[in-house]
Amino acid sequence: MLVKRLFAFKGTLSNASIQHRLKYLITAALVALAFYLAILNRQWAHLDKVFRFEPSHNPPLPPVPTSNHPIYKLAENAQVQFKQLLGKRSVSLEQAASRYRERRGRHPPPGFDKWFSAAQKSDAIIVEDFFDRIYHDINPFWALEPARLRRMIKDEQHYIRVRDGKAWFISDHLELRQPWVQRWTELVQEMMPNLPDLDMVLNVMDETRVLVPWEDITKYATEERRQRNIFHPSEAVAEYTKYQDEHSDKDEPAIKVEWIGNELHKYWDHYRVTCPPDTPGHNASSLETLERPPSYPTQPLPFTKDGFIQNFTASTDPCLQPHIRGMHGTFIESVSMSTTHSLFPIFGGSVGILTAGTGRRKKNELVWRGVASGGRHKAENWWGFQRLRFIQMMNGTTVSLLEAGEDVAPTFRLSELGEYQTEAQRNNSLGKWISSISDAAFVRFECFPQQEDKLCSYLAPYMELRDSIHMKEQYNYKFLPDIDGNSYSGRFRAFMRSTSLVLKSTIYAEWHDDRLTPWVHFVPFDNSFIDIYAILEYYLAHDAEAHRIAEEGREWSEKVMRREDMKLYVWRLLLEYARVMDPAREKLAFVEDLKG
Ligand SMILES: *[C@@H]1O[C@H](CO)[C@@H](O)[C@H](O)[C@H]1NC(C)=O
Ligand SMILES: *[C@@H]1O[C@H](CO)[C@@H](O)[C@H](O)[C@H]1NC(C)=O
Ligand SMILES: *[C@@H]1O[C@H](CO)[C@@H](O)[C@H](O)[C@H]1NC(C)=O
Ligand SMILES: *[C@@H]1O[C@H](CO)[C@@H](O)[C@H](O)[C@H]1NC(C)=O
């Protein structure tokens, strides 16, 4: 209900080598479009009109003193990586097309030139790597026949249709015309008349997931690679097939996708088949009983360096951290579940609004307000949910009681923080310290079963509701943590523009992942939150570094995460989608740049 998304394939399809392990979690959307969301909380409702953008007259950033701390080193390395990425910017159509061929092993799709000129007009920064996710998501479909793909979506009831340069939304159910569907439609309409005919199936369910087993996705990836071909320009076809020219559409029966029903708590077992056999997730079955508090990993996680996240992409991968099955609502009990193990083209996402922050002085504190979402929590399972864990960990009273030996925190273990010992913890005053730097609370519980007073009896001894805090007010705090709800959190893009330091942990992928560099633009933290106190302690003590990330994050997001950038991303995605669905797809290509 929070954010719609059709599929988010998780994992990597390496461009360099097929041996690279593959894994796709396709979460509720073909595209992991982190269109973010207006309907999240009450405080979001006010933001519609605040499309404000203050000209930045940046004072020079204070110099960052060197240090031996692991966080300092991670951030310095990340700076180097980011500079390398910037060097790959394409400034001409020829350059963009040639980088495309190099990275994708095909010619660009027809319409690439119009796309590129729109990108130039809106001053978009075009780096081919920024679009990697599209290929991660689209490539497997090259392994299925276009006729078959078309038959798979034939009986779907909610879709955006493009014909002859016009786009509109079709649905049998008026009640399904939610605002995010409207925004999707408007976004596609803005690309007209530059898109070919297509039908784009929208996911109207909450958490639809396409979980393709690792063996299948590996097979598809091999097949896709086999088909890659940069053929002679004279063979290229520049026009997509019109839908009415495609008779098989009418004659052939639809192919039904098999959806797996309601085993709400067995989701992990469906998920782990997507994990490569050599990852710990593959062999870990669903938990029979939910441990209280949850189990933590016993060894350093492979994506960390000296305890902190080094590879953020890998840190979002549940296959590498099977303990997450007891620490994330998605794997404990989803709000709704509708899963298939077949590859199926379906889109989702909510387009939201933007607001800008100002560079005022920040309170040296963390703030978080939100809903206790993340799945269906109830008396028997609530302590496994990530947001509930976060709220308890950020509650100084709770932590003080815990330090005094009381059994007040079923959601986490202090003893697991051994290697992250903060000074406050060594002093046995962690709780007091947290009270002084944190203001985190729920504005709504969403109990199950629903309770009259909306206060969950099972949560009452541990937490209470607080009033929401307007987003603009939140920007006055130094730290803005971002934590998954039912799907990815919808507020990340707004946070990035706030000039506060954004902290992020997630298991979901989003459209802008390839554009941001962790430790340069935001600070990643582990999904168990085991590192959060140490991170807060570090950035409270290293203000110049916190400031640098907050400023660079804001500046960069204003360049590459704008609505225009989202539109260009979707535009390019739809060109690829139209091509892979086209019966003549093998020769569909943009080659004008080669015809000099
Ligand atoms: C998972 O189990 C299979 C079969 O029992 C075994 O061959 C494989 O090595 C195991 N993988 C891991 C990562 O433990
Ligand atoms: C980070 O992890 C991803 C996914 O596991 C992997 O493909 C990538 O190569 C890793 N990056 C580095 C720099 O190791
Ligand atoms: C820890 O204790 C020392 C000595 O009493 C004190 O100076 C310091 O401020 C304390 N630190 C924290 C974070 O409480
Ligand atoms: C913090 O913890 C205390 C004790 O567990 C609890 O009574 C209080 O409601 C919690 N505060 C919030 C904001 O949840």
Image (tube, rainbow, N blue to C red):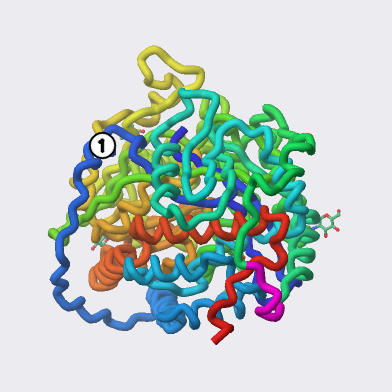
Q: Main secondary structure of the magenta part?
A: loop
Q: How many marks?
A: 1
The percent coordinates of residue 485 (x first, y second) are 46, 40
Question: SS at mark 1?
Answer: helix
Classify residue 139 by image quadrant. Answer: bottom right
The answer to whether residue 475 is seen in the rendering is: yes
Label 1 Cα neighbours within 10 Å, binned few <14 / some 14-19 / many ≥20? some
Residue interval drawn in magenta = 230-237
Viewer-proximal residue, 4 or 335?
A: 4
Q: Give the side of residue 224 with respect to residue 480, left or right.
A: right
| Ligand 2: image quarter | bottom right
Residue at x 21%, y 49% (from the top left corner): 51
Q: Please, what is the three-letter code of the amino acid marked with disc 1?
A: Gln
The answer to whether residue 404 is seen in the rendering is: no
The percent coordinates of residue 457 (x first, y second) are 43, 19
Q: Give the side of residue 253 with respect to residue 124, left or right.
A: right
The percent coordinates of residue 269 (x first, y second) are 72, 41
Residue denoted by label 1: 43
Residue at x 72%, y 33% (from the top left corner): 260
